[in-house]
Amino acid sequence: MTEMTSPSRVERRKARTRAALVGAAQSLLASGRTHVAVLEITQAADVGMGSFYNHFESKDQLFEAAVAEALDAHGTLMDQLTAGVDDPARAFAQSFRLTGRLHRVQPELSRVILHAPLAFYSPTSGLAPRALRDIQNGIDSGRFTVRDAQLALVAAAGSTLFLGQLLHEQPDRDDREASDQLAEDLLRMFGVPADEAHTISREPLPDLMVATSHPS
């Protein structure tokens, strides 16, 4: 019988140091300050210079990790909030609408993601593979009539990213209405009848404020 072992003190300290570095990098990305020295990053993380190179080979590698972890955190949250939604059209719309709202609920996370838009299209992590899954499920079930799931993903991803940018540039714009309207338009583009697309894109959503303040 194999005994379960808890992380050692050294492993826990390494994990805390790495998390501090990633958190500092995310804050810098969110504020648009990427042309900084490694020393400034380590000072923001409150760790030593030597600790940086125990985890990352370069500043660019750290920033890549910061974006990847932001995308994964967002994707995991969307999975949690859409769990139990069996209809692919509803799952897609709910995730899109919640993502639109997240730009205002978690503006720092939003800015990190928007800083590296190409990372959004990663085939293995973050939001893109999850959206592609929902779109493909919609095609397989007959809910969507689009012929190419990846091209549909391009439309959805582009809408998500440009919506986020628009909401940051226009703080007075209603993020809920904008997200719901775009979700409706995408559903119609994917082949959902207009009246049903409108209904789905106005259905109640999980409480995003509660979910982001009490992550599981």
Image (cartoon, rainbow, N blue to C red):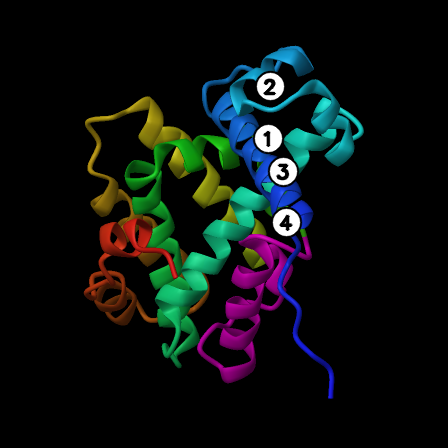
Give the distance between the C-alpha atoms of the residues marked 4 and 1, in whole angstroms.
18 Å
Q: Which mark is residue 21?
A: 1
Q: Is residue 174 above or below residue 176?
A: above
**Contact check, label 1 and label 2, Cβ < 8 Å:** yes
Res. 202 image quadrant: bottom left
Query: Callout 1 environment at 10 Å: few (<14), some (14 to 19), or many (20+)?
Result: many
Q: Earlier in the sequence, mark 4 or mark 3?
A: 4
For badge 2, the amino acid type reads Ile
Q: Is residue 130 magenta?
A: yes
Res. 22 image quadrant: top right
Q: Which residue is mark 4?
A: 9
Q: Callout 3: helix, strand or loop?
A: helix
Tag count: 4
Q: Which residue is mark 3?
A: 18
Q: Which mark is residue 35?
A: none
For badge 4, the amino acid type reads Arg
Give percent across and percent down for residue 25: 57, 27
Q: Is residue 75 above or below residue 115?
A: below
Asked whether, in this view, residue 2 is left or right of residue 25, the answer is right
**Contact check, label 4 and label 2, Cβ < 8 Å:** no
Between 147 and 113, the one nearer to me in the picture: 113
**Contact check, label 4 and label 3, Cβ < 8 Å:** no
Which callout, 4 or 3, points to the residue nearer the camera?
A: 4
Q: Earlier in the sequence, mark 4 or mark 2?
A: 4
Residue at 61% over, 20% down: 42
Give percent across and percent down for residue 58: 77, 25
For badge 1, the amino acid type reads Leu
